[in-house]
């Protein structure tokens, strides 16, 4: 599947403004898709369309830093030490899934890991679903679980 086709399909479920911070969207608008990693987008499409099959909320009117973050985001500006997370790299996001808890969503993703187009990392112990595609060196599985 080409990147172009992945984005076209994802647009049925997400707006660019939901996946990047308000600063990025204000500056680049619909071109903001360019910053999002292809593996991340292809995993997001499969998780949304084929695994969870339910609305996934990233950014909305009141939450604007759950997707890609930039240097103007408070969560980035406030860091006293270097901060390079999947959110900065356009390789991850935090989601609320309609109709299920974060734990239920994580279980469903793990149970359907064979459908994922690439390995992902998921964060455990939080009440949102963080997943990203940052490479996890020396891990041969499909779903790497970590605690921040
Ligand atoms: Zn920002
Ligand atoms: Zn996160």
Image (tube, helix red, strand yellow):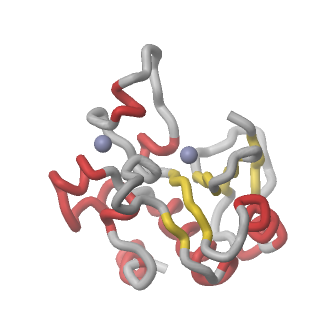
x, y (%) of residue 23?
24, 47
Query: What residue occupies the far top of the structure in this picture?
Result: 80
Quadrant of the image for the C terminus?
Answer: top right
x, y (%) of residue 48?
58, 76
Query: What residue occupies the far front of the structure in this picture?
Result: 62
User: Which of the pair 37/102 is nearer the observer?
Assistant: 102
Q: In this view, does 80 lie above or below 15?
A: above
Res. 46 image quadrant: bottom right
x, y (%) of residue 64?
37, 51
Judged left or right of residue 29, residue 107 is right
Res. 69 image quadrant: top left
User: Which of the pair 46/79 is nearer the observer?
Assistant: 79
User: Which of the pair 13/74 is nearer the observer?
Assistant: 74
Q: In this view, does 115 lie above or below 134?
A: below
Q: Is residue 100 above or below residue 72?
A: below
Residue in view at x 76 percent, y 49 percent: 144
x, y (%) of residue 72?
27, 35
**Image quarter for ligand 1:** top left
User: Which of the pair 40/78 is nearer the observer?
Assistant: 78
The mark total stands at: 0
Query: What residue occupies the far left of the structure in this picture?
Result: 27
Res. 19 image quadrant: bottom left
Residue in view at x 34 percent, y 60 percent: 61
Residue in view at x 41 percent, y 33 percent: 75
Q: In this view, does 76 lie above or below 41?
A: above
Residue in view at x 45 percent, y 20 percent: 82
Judged left or right of residue 127, residue 23 is left
């Amino acid at each position: 599947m080409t990147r172009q086709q992945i984005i076209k399909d994802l647009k049925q479920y997400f707006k660019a403004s939901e996946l990047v911070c308000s600063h990025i969207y204000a500056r680049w608008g619909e071109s903001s898709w360019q910053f999002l990693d292809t593996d991340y987008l292809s995993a997001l499409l499969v998780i949304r369309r084929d695994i969870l099959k339910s609305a996934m909320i990233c950014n909305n009117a009141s939450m604007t830093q759950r997707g890609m973050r930039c240097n103007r985001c408070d969560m980035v500006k406030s860091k006293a030490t270097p901060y390079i997370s999947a959110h900065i790299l356009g390789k991850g996001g935090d989601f609320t899934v309609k109709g299920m808890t974060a734990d239920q969503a994580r279980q469903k993703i793990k149970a359907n890991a064979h459908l994922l187009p690439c390995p992902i990392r998921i964060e455990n112990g939080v009440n949102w679903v963080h997943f990203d595609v940052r490479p996890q060196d020396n891990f041969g599985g499909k779903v790497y679980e970590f605690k921040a």
